[in-house]
Image: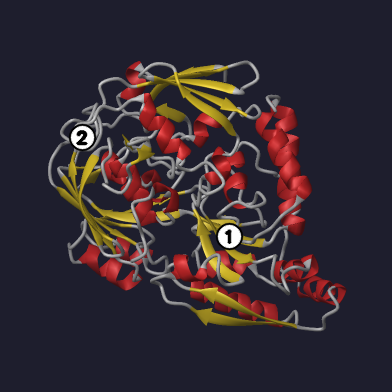
């Protein structure tokens, strides 16, 4: 933990195992994304969906990246080390890197880029994960020192967050508006909610990624349109397949289906600051009112597992395998309604396929299972466009997807800490917040495990988010697309497909 270097052979393919055959260069790769809204911007702090996640990671460099094996690799930082208490972290920066505009990359860029997400006035989704930074200072042109309020053994992972793109400094501020970056591809045009077009960066610091000459990314939120575009040859890849027809699509010549297990989970978020969700008995009634196995079978078609009302995946270090599984139990749901002083309950549940594929159908299945518990769920079908800006975090009961995060602290801090911008249940728990801070600076693995176990139990019993299922990433490409082992931290190879894939 105290000293981690990433160099030499590890930089040849920093995202995973070496390819069996050398990647080829050339061509225009066209990707159909299940995301994209007219309200999308180039501000890294406001990205909310897979379209802008891919865009950020294609345009910009990051201090660190998560590899396909879940471990951390170098990007703009080549080496990092911490003091024994993990409060002070020093990062050595890569030399010779230029932005697309020709501006040299320096430590000042890192400082202004990270500070963009800090401070009381910040509206960034990454605000909570950088709040623990007490100070950032340059130690020369290519070294940055971070001083933290308390120790954080996972701090280098935090800097891989998709929102923490390193953008150029201009007049003491981060210049994200221009679209200038130092990543694999240069942004040529961006039409929010429609398309983006990029060209390979000829001055990229390495030849071992970014094999396509050009990238065209299309926002194809409609599932049928996305699938048709792949089948007709209008695009070379799509994400979020129709799981009902994966088997049929797999039989089509020229199409490859890819399935990756990870931390992606689908949720129903309840605003705990609004009635009736202020009452934990109401929340528990709804948790017992959903048939999780049915959702995995009929929505995921077996491409996933049941969830237990917390966001930690089974493959993560501190997954609580001792926590009793919450199951469908109408009698227990009725019991908790009575404890809330209710004989029945009526609530609206907002859903759209923009939330996740089959979200409306999942809401209807929830509606049907909850009836036996005396719960009337009125499913409100929302428009796809504007769902993330006008419905999520606005309506009191919504369908949501989460890609998850590589480490527990990052996921909890992003979506469950009191006051977090993306705390979509507006939940606040003093004990949870206390454990979150203590676990972050705890260096003993056994003690950390106990804390993270308790935090998952608190969410299971008292949290405002129903997590009924974890979904595998299922995406498709044409059979002339080459790749290495896929990453599992986000969809479509960690949303780094544009720099990791190639035409064979």
Q: Which residue is mark 2?
A: 23
Q: Which residue is mark 1?
A: 469
Residue 298 numbered tag: none
Question: In the rendered view of the protein, which quadrant contains the C terminus?
Answer: top left
Q: How many tags in the picture?
A: 2
* Residue 183 seen from this side: yes
Residue 161 or residue 401, whichever sits in front: 161
Task: State the residue at coordinates (46%, 30%).
Answer: 72
Residue 41 or residue 295, whichever sits in front: 41
Location of residue 434 by image quarter = top right
Location of residue 237 by image quarter = bottom left
Q: Position of residue 135 (x, y in %)?
A: 54, 28
Distance (Cα) linking label 1 and label 2: 36 Å
Q: Position of residue 41 (x, y in %)?
A: 35, 56
Task: State the residue at coordinates (42%, 65%).
Answer: 243
**Marks 1 and 2 close (CB-CB < 8 Å):** no
């Amino acid at each position: 933990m105290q000293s981690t270097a990433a160099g030499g052979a590890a930089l040849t393919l920093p995202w995973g195992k070496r390819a069996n055959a050398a990647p080829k260069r050339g061509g225009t790769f066209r990707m159909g994304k299940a995301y994209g809204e007219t309200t999308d911007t180039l501000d890294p702090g406001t990205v909310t969906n897979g379209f802008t996640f891919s865009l950020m990671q294609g345009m910009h460099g990051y201090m660190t990246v998560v590899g396909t094996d879940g471990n951390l690799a170098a990007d703009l930082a080549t080496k990092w080390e911490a003091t024994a208490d993990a409060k002070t972290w020093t990062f050595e920066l890569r030399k010779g890197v230029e932005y697309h505009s020709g501006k040299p990359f320096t430590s000042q860029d890192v400082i202004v880029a990270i500070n963009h997400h800090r401070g009381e006035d910040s509206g960034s989704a990454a605000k909570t994960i950088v709040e623990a930074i007490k100070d950032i200072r340059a130690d020369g042109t290519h070294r940055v020192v971070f001083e933290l309020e308390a120790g954080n053994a996972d701090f280098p992972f935090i800097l891989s967050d998709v929102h923490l793109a390193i953008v150029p400094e201009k007049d003491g501020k981060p210049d994200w508006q221009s679209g200038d970056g130092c990543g694999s591809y240069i942004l040529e045009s961006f039409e929010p909610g429609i398309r983006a077009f990029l060209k390979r960066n000829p001055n990229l610091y390495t030849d071992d990624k970014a094999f396509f000459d050009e990238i065209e990314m299309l926002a194809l939120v409609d599932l049928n349109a996305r699938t048709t575009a792949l089948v007709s040859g209008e695009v070379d890849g799509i994400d979020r397949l129709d799981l009902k027809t994966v088997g049929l699509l797999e039989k089509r010549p020229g199409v490859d289906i890819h399935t990756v297990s990870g931390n992606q989970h689908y949720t129903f978020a309840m605003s705990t600051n609004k009635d009736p969700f202020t009452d934990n008995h109401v929340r528990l009634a709804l948790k017992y009112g959903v048939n999780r196995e049915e959702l995995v079978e009929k929505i995921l078609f077996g491409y996933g597992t049941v969830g237990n009302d917390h966001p930690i995946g089974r493959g993560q270090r501190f997954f609580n395998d001792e926590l009793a599984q919450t199951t469908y139990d109408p009698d227990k749901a009725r019991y908790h309604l009575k404890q809330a002083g209710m004989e029945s309950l009526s609530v609206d549940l907002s859903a759209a396929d923009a939330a996740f594929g089959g979200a409306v159908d999942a809401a209807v299945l929830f509606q049907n299972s909850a009836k036996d518990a005396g719960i009337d769920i009125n499913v409100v079908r929302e428009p796809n466009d504007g769902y993330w800006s006008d419905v999520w975090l606005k309506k009191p009961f919504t369908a949501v997807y989460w890609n998850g995060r590589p480490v527990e602290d990052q996921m909890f801090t992003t979506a469950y800490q009191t006051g977090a911008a993306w705390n979509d249940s507006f939940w606040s728990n003093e004990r949870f917040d206390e454990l979150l801070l203590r676990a972050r600076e705890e260096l003993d693995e056994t003690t950390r495990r106990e804390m993270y176990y308790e935090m998952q139990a608190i969410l299971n019993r008292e949290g405002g988010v129903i997590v009924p299922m974890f979904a595998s990433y299922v995406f498709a490409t044409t059979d002339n697309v080459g790749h290495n082992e896929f990453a599992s931290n986000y969809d479509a190879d960690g949303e780094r497909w544009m720099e990791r894939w190639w035409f064979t």
